[in-house]
Amino acid sequence: MLKRLHVYFKEMYPIIPRFILGCIVFFEIYFIVLLNNGVVKFQIDMQEFIGASTVFAFLMWLRIADDLKDYETDKLLFKERPLPSGKVTKKDIIMRCVV
């Protein structure tokens, strides 16, 4: 099951690039909020990394939800993707990622 999840994440949601994207999105919003409130001194601490991880996880759940929602369409149009091709099952994704 872990091998199948590895295939899914490698093809549909590469972990490192998406984590970097999550950090960029979080810190853009974070710095805009700080600057709008007049804060010029800030410190990057554990809370900021938790925020970036939250954005990363939210984007991952959106990707998984989209794959589950579009399963029937993907079987017709994108047969090479991991879920419609059978490389990964719905059970793998739901049990390990969503719960």
Image: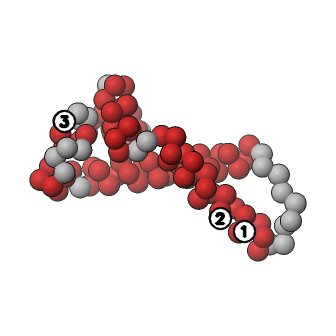
Label 2 sits on a secondary structure element that is helix
- Locate residue 26 relative to residue 60 in the image: left or right: right
Q: Is residue 70 above or below residue 90?
A: below
Distance Cα–Cα, label 1 vs label 3: 44 Å
Distance Cα–Cα, label 2 vs label 1: 6 Å
Residue kind at label 1, given as amino acid type: Val
Q: Which residue is mark 2?
A: 29
**Which residue occupies 82% across, 52% down?**
43
Residue kind at label 3, given as amino acid type: Gly
**Which residue occupies 84% across, 72% down?**
38
Residue kind at label 2, given as amino acid type: Ile
Callouts 3 and 2 close, C-beta under 8 Å: no
Q: Which residue is mark 3?
A: 86
Going from the N terminus, do you reach mark 3 or mark 2 first? 2
**Depth order, front residue of 79/96:** 79
**Which residue occupies 52% across, 40% down?**
16
Q: Position of residue 25 (x, y in %)?
A: 59, 59
Q: Which residue is mark 1?
A: 33
Distance Cα–Cα, label 3 vs label 2: 38 Å
